[in-house]
Amino acid sequence: MTELNAEHARRAIVEHTRRLAESAAAAGPDAAVPTTPQWTVTDLVEHVGQTQHWTAEIIERRITDPTQLPTDYAVLPADARQWQAWLSESAQRVANAFSDDALDAPVFNAAGDERSGTRFWLSNVLNETVIHGFDAANAANQPVDIDADIAAALISHHLAMLTSPTWEMMRTESAHAIRGTGQTLQWLATDTTHDAGAWFVERRPDRATWQPGTQRADVTVTGPARSLLLTLTRRLPLTDREATGISIHGDTHLAQHWLDNTAHIAD
């Protein structure tokens, strides 16, 4: 799995949260969020800040038992002028919680995969912050820059989630929809090192699987890591090459079917 240097990830959480706060202020609290149609900017800010505080508590307390997960959530300030400080606090708290000492400590892993719990949550918080940062910028009609290495690590995290035991249990309909009879998809980033920017997906009868690297596939989707991430998370359309720089070789319908059936709950 493509993993970021922990210090790089910590800095990215703080930086992308700062950008999200600026975009939220520019858009306004009541603005609609086109890429998460059920949400306003207020909902977006509340979700990100609460997720960061909630996750920080899990790591700080080294929670290993899912029945002991926090049940209280941080309260969003009613005054939108306080949001930037509130988000800065949540980002710094969770970044501090992901200390080097915590990275391999026993902590509950909500994906149920081979990662340590803290490393799972580090990827998860970074993903929430980056993707919802894009949502906020989109609501404010602002451009978004995502480092290629960060995007590549988040693609690996995304695919790990979709093929995890937890996804099979909690999102059964999606997990079953992305099974197949051996169909294969290759995702290739054009702006990372070869090993870090290649993901091969196989849709088997019992489950979907993924692995790093390149193989011959029924469809190959190639483009900048940022565009691949935002397409996989359903923020950008698959077939708008002018907007994304993505090219598709092979069965486009197979790639689109994958995207249509892999929405996260907050999409």
Image (cartoon, grey):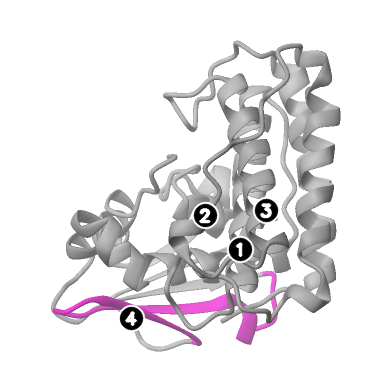
- Other residues around mark 1 within 10 Å, as few (<14) / some (14–19) / many (≥20): many
Closer to the observer: label 2 or label 4?
2
Q: Position of residue 7 (x, y in %)?
A: 84, 69
Q: Earlier in the sequence, mark 2 or mark 4?
A: 2
Say if mark 2 contacts mark 4, CB within 8 Å: no
The residue under label 2 is: 69
151 shown above or below 216: above
Residue 48: % across, % down: 63, 39
Q: Which residue, given by chain and number where applicable, does mark 4 sit on?
A: 217
Q: Tell me where the magenta segment starts and ends, as one range.
A: 191-213
Distance between mark 3 and mark 4 Cα atoms? 42 Å
Of the 4 image quadrants, the one containing the N terminus is bottom right
| Magenta segment includes 203 | yes
According to the image, label 3 marks what residue? 57
Rendered image: mark on residue 121: 1
Q: Secondary structure at mark 4?
A: loop
Compare marks 2 and 3 and give the one earlier in the sequence.
3
Q: CA distance from mark 2 to mark 3?
A: 9 Å
Mark 2 neighbour class, 10 Å CA radius: few under 14, some 14 to 19, many 20 or more? some
Hey, what amino acid is under mark 3? Glu
Height in image: 137 above or below 226?
above
The front one of 34 and 68 is 68
**Disc 2 to disc 1, how far (Cα)?**
13 Å
**Who's the residue at 84% across and 38% down the image?**
88
